[in-house]
Amino acid sequence: MFDIAYLPTEIIDLIAIYAERDDLKALRLTNSFFLNATTKVLYKEIHISQNSRSFDRAFEVAESPKLHSLVKSLVYHLGTLGEVYSGFEAFRHEYYSTRRRPNSSDVYDPTKITADVLWCYSCWLEEIDGENTFSSIRDEAYELRRLCEQLPHLDSIATVLDDVDPFSEPTDYIGKRTGMHLSNFTNDIHFARLFAASSEKPLHKVSGRSISWRDLRTLQLNQSVALKQRLGQLKFLELGLYNAENEHDTVSWEEEKRLTQIEALDALGAVLDSAKFLTTLKLDFVELPYESAVDEMLPVSRTIFRHHWPILQKLKLEAICADECELLNFLTAHKASLRELQLGDIELANSLETRASVLRLFNGVRKSLRLRTCTITGNFTNRLDQAWYVDTECEQPECIREQLEIYMCNSSSRAATNELTSLYARRWVENSELELEFENFCDESWQWCPELLEEAD
């Protein structure tokens, strides 16, 4: 009979790295070999939310002499449950609603009272109490600073808003306990407070996902030599910003709105100016407002394009409107180091002289860059005659999206390129005009989206 104790330590460590979190908790109780390996993985990253119970659990780890030195990353979940249910009856109805599937034959009976419903309701009450306690008697900035001070090897921070899918069960910790999604989100400066709380830490990775422009403006207002040095140490920077225009829809005067946008872009530029030595940059503006005028959206991309990172290897640009030539010139300026590229929700601006072309951009990326991997997601349009939605869930081996992603990774070997790229993909991508009918371009991975055009049929 095989004894797991004879496995090399390196193998056990690999098992722990690739195991799911629930499996890690079970493996941790198996024996001393898995105890050490799983503990290092389980406590490498800790998660907190705006909840007294969550912070108390984090402090238990931070105050443990055996565990606090293992923590390298701190992830702050920004969503809250919110008191939207008047009582058990309303909660039960919502509980069953979240467990319905599209086109599902599951019986939907909100009158049922099961042990699961009762348990989730009690957990929901606990979480609501924890959120209320945190918001009423605990100082977020102070709690974050005290927590970071007790984590000596912290080198990564992140904020995240858990994705909400009304037709699937929640996957986050609180969602699993309560059966409810973390959906409420207040436009506050949580990211700025977390960044300030970790001011004594030599951070190398910062991920601010689902944050507001107020966060960046707060960082800019606190500009100092120390802040610039901290940003200058970063190797990984991710910013997922709510669109500046959407954030200020309630502004009455256009002049005030314009000044607010200028302040927001200045803040973005200041952060990018200081983070000069990035190897990974991910910029996501959450949602591209296609109803907005192009001139209102172009300043965001131009704020990005005036920067250069000499050792940038991985780049993600999502939800931006850009001039085709400016975007391609920006990418080409990084061709010496850039090897991984992700593009999503891209709108190309048309000039008076030239009609922008998404296909021409793809072809230009292939000719100008030396990519190892390329990922294409979301919407692509020039608002006139090209408009597609890219479905990344399509896994058919001959889908155009996969062929195009391979094509854009320009191989040094022509034979390798021929082997990886289908004749069909080459036929339309290498076409000199690159203006084919959309019926010849779309498959199950590319859906024609006329609603993205200015004058949809």
Image: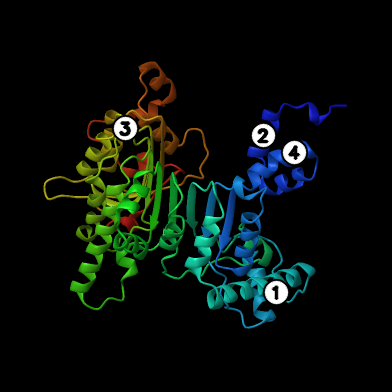
Q: CA gap, disc 2 to disc 1? A: 45 Å
Query: Residue 37 vs residue 363: left or right?
Result: right
Q: Name which residue type carries label 2.
A: Asp
Query: Residue 119 vs residue 313: left or right?
Result: right
Q: Earlier in the sequence, mark 2 or mark 1?
A: 2
Give the residue displayed 28% in from the left and 62% down from the top. 264
Q: CA gap, disc 4 to disc 2? A: 8 Å
- Under tag 2, what secondary structure? helix
Q: Nearer the viewer, mark 3 or mark 4?
A: 4
Q: CA gap, disc 3 to disc 4? A: 51 Å
Residue 29 vs 430, above or below: the answer is below
- Callout 2 touching callout 3 (CB < 8 Å): no
Q: Nearer the viewer, residue 10 or 258?
A: 10
Q: CA gap, disc 2 to disc 3? A: 45 Å
Give the residue displayed 67% in from the left and 67% down from the top. 178
Provide the residue designation for mark 4.
34
Residue 69 vs 125, above or below: the answer is above
Crowd around label 1: few <14 · some 14–19 · many ≥20 (10 Å): some
Please provide percent x and percent y for residue 239. 39, 53
Q: Name which residue type carries label 4.
A: Phe
Q: Nearer the viewer, residue 173 or 38?
A: 38
Please provide percent x and percent y for residue 74. 53, 53
